[in-house]
Structures are given as structure tokens and as C-alpha cells.
Amino acid sequence: MFIKNDESFICNHCGKRVEKLEYTSRDHCNHCLYSIHVDINPGDRLNDCMGILKPINIETKTKGEIVIYKCLKCNNIIRNKTADDDNKDMIYKIVEDYAKNGGI
């Protein structure tokens, strides 16, 4: 159940302004790739957790890349699609750090 919810925001992690995505819902910062645990179902903004979602890995799928997050408050693992304007250097760094840390 997807609800389109595309809004600009200021990232709680890096402090940069993140613009609307326009073609789908913006769910993470395109600069640092961090997010906030706000959704139960994509775009609904109904989760009370509000914890910081730290990007811990990137999965490559046939339809693109998926950011794997760990919530720093509730420890849930969340998956979100990357956006076209995501910082590619940050994507590579997340993958590199994941491999360097033995998948942790």
C-alpha cells in the first residue's frame, strides 16, 4: 500500500535541504542517504518511532538499488529504493563500509 507523499525537508543528519523528488515519494536525504523512521507503509507517515534510519548497505536489484537502513531507535531494518539524484559517492561508501565491517 503506497501513498505518494513527496515533500521538501531539511535533513536531520546532515542539515542540507532536500528537494521534492517529483516522480515518487521522497523518503531519504539524497546527500547523506539518512532517513527518519516515519512510515508504517510507504508514504503514510504514521509511524510513531521517529528514529534515525542509518544507511548500512545497498542491495542491487533488477529494478535498481535499494538502501538498507537500521533504525537507531527501534533497531528495525527498513528498505527503500534509491532516487535518481542520490549521491553516488555516498552509495559507494556505504557498500565499502559494509564490506569492510564484515557485513555489520
Image (cartoon, rainbow, N blue to C red):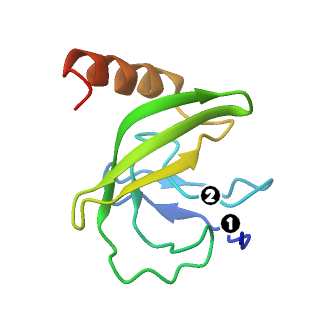
What residue is pinned by disc 2? 26
SS for tag 2?
loop
| Cα separation between marks 2 and 1 | 5 Å
Q: Position of residue 61 (x, y in %)?
A: 64, 29
Question: Which quadrant, please, contains the N terminus?
Answer: bottom right
SS for tag 1?
loop
Which class describes the residues within 10 Å of circle 2: few (<14), some (14-19), or many (20+)? many
**Residue found 68% across the figure and 61% down from its top:** 25
**Residue found 74% across the figure and 70% down from its top:** 4
Identify residue type, mark 2.
Answer: Arg
Identify residue type, mark 1.
Answer: Asp
Q: Earlier in the sequence, mark 2 or mark 1?
A: 1
Q: Position of residue 33 (x, y in %)?
A: 44, 43
What residue is pinned by disc 1? 6
**Residue found 72% across the figure and 69% down from its top:** 2
**Residue found 32% across the figure and 60% down from its top:** 76
Check contact, mark 2 vs mark 1: CB within 8 A.
yes
Q: Position of residue 47 (x, y in %)?
A: 44, 80
